Amino acid sequence: MNGHLNKTSQTIIALLILVLGIVTEHSVGVFDQVSAFVTPDKQAVPSVKDAINAYPTVTLDSQAKKVDLATMWEVWNLLEKSYLEPDKIETEKMIDGAIAGMTSSLGDPYTMYLPPEDNKRSGEELAGSFYGVGIELGYLDGVLTAVTPLIGSPAEAAGVLPGDYIIRVKDEAKNFDEDTTGWGLNEAVSHIRGKKGTKVTLTLFRKTAEKPEPFEVTIVRDEIIVKSVELKFIEQGGKKVAHIRLSRFGERTIDEWDEAVQAILKEGASVDGVLLDMRNNPGGFFDDAIYIASEFITDGSVVLQKGQLGEQTFDAKGKGRLKNMPVEVLVNKGSASASEIVAGALRDRMDAKLIGEQTFGKGTVQTRQALSNGGGIHVTIARWMLPKGEWIHDTGIPVNIEVKNNPETEQDEVIDRSIQEI
């Protein structure tokens, strides 16, 4: 680099300066509002030296004091001039790191900066759709593994099985061919996902095969839609129950939830109760949690929220279509955030039993904002409390009946016990 910044870099640096003085607008959602930080239409700073002179300080209106940015620019200049491997100095990555450092300095793991690629992936997860092959990824024996191919996915059609090791990924269109050793999940996802209609070749190893040896599978990527609500009717012990598996609170959740409720109502009095299964549900949109809790709670509070702008009570606002049905709530240590709001509200207001394992314990609300560089920022804006005033952050919600699944059996012990309680 020659000490001068290109136009894109200049704009992002101007954004970095502006972010220091921004006061985030209040939002009622865990992740329910997406807006943009708009930078003024001005000439970009032509060099680091000029940036020091042009922006020596930034006024933080919320604290009525000035912050000196000269040291930051001084370090930037020193790195450009002196670092051993100048070809490794990437302007965008340095800025990403600076912004990430600002958010991490607060010591709050839920206030974070997401670079453009990570922010895109976060949006896809909330939307419940993306382009790829449709494999839930994980690690087994330290090796990247296909935990399970999604039903109806290209991976399933290509013959990928649960437990297959993924030892190599090849994408000829990108001139990419690498071993997966040492990859993190984000890196694996970024290489396996891709545009619709493109091909990716996975080298798999299936240790359960008669003659285990690596083999290749070429998969054509397609749109993958991950349902957040799945309904099954279970008849067991002389009872018929509606088992609703709610895996996230995203953009498709309300429509999928309404379909499930209509199917339950169609069964009429033959349904003895509802199992609301939110195991491993990491949360999502705050408003969705209010909506779903309100299907069982007809009036009064669902959750309380306290932030810089004071305290607010969020009351039931749904249709109460399941209010007359017995309900038990299935949770575990992977149940967090919005799923804890629903579980706690049904426990406090409906005396519903929580069955399974104690929940994760995330009792804060974040706003999700889009940035002009394509990245995003999540900012903690409030605490939320259960209807009786309990703040469960870092402690979780204890269950009424503790049941752990036995991975050695085909039965779901938590569902079995929950049906007994209906």
Image (spheres, rainbow, N blue to C red):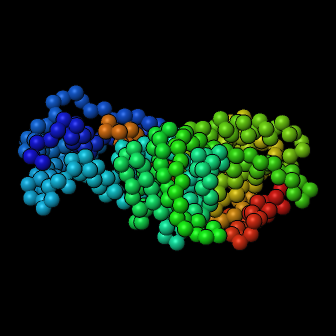
Residue 279 image offset from top left, x and y in percent: 65, 57
Question: Quick one: which residue is furthest to the right in this view?
Answer: 238
In this rendering, the count of numbered labels is 0
Is the C terminus in the top left, top right, bottom left or bottom right quadrant? bottom right
**Residue at 60%, 50% in the rendered image:** 158
Relative side of 5 to 347, left or right? left
Tell me if I can see residue 123 in this picture.
no
Question: Quick one: which residue is furthest to the top in this view?
Answer: 41
Residue 16 image offset from top left, x and y in percent: 25, 43
Relative side of 300 to 180, left or right? right
Which image quadrant is residue 20 in? top left
Residue 418 to residue 21: above or below: below
Which image quadrant is residue 85 in? bottom left
Residue 83 to residue 374: above or below: below
Relative side of 371 to 29, left or right? left
Residue 415 image offset from top left, x and y in percent: 76, 60
**Residue at 59%, 41% in the rendered image:** 225
* In front of the other: 23 or 4: 4
Question: Quick one: which residue is furthest to the front in this view?
Answer: 211
**Residue at 41%, 34% in the rendered image:** 35
Tell me if I can see residue 16 in this picture.
yes
* In front of the other: 88 or 242: 88
**Residue at 70%, 36% in the rendered image:** 258
Residue 313 image offset from top left, x and y in percent: 57, 42
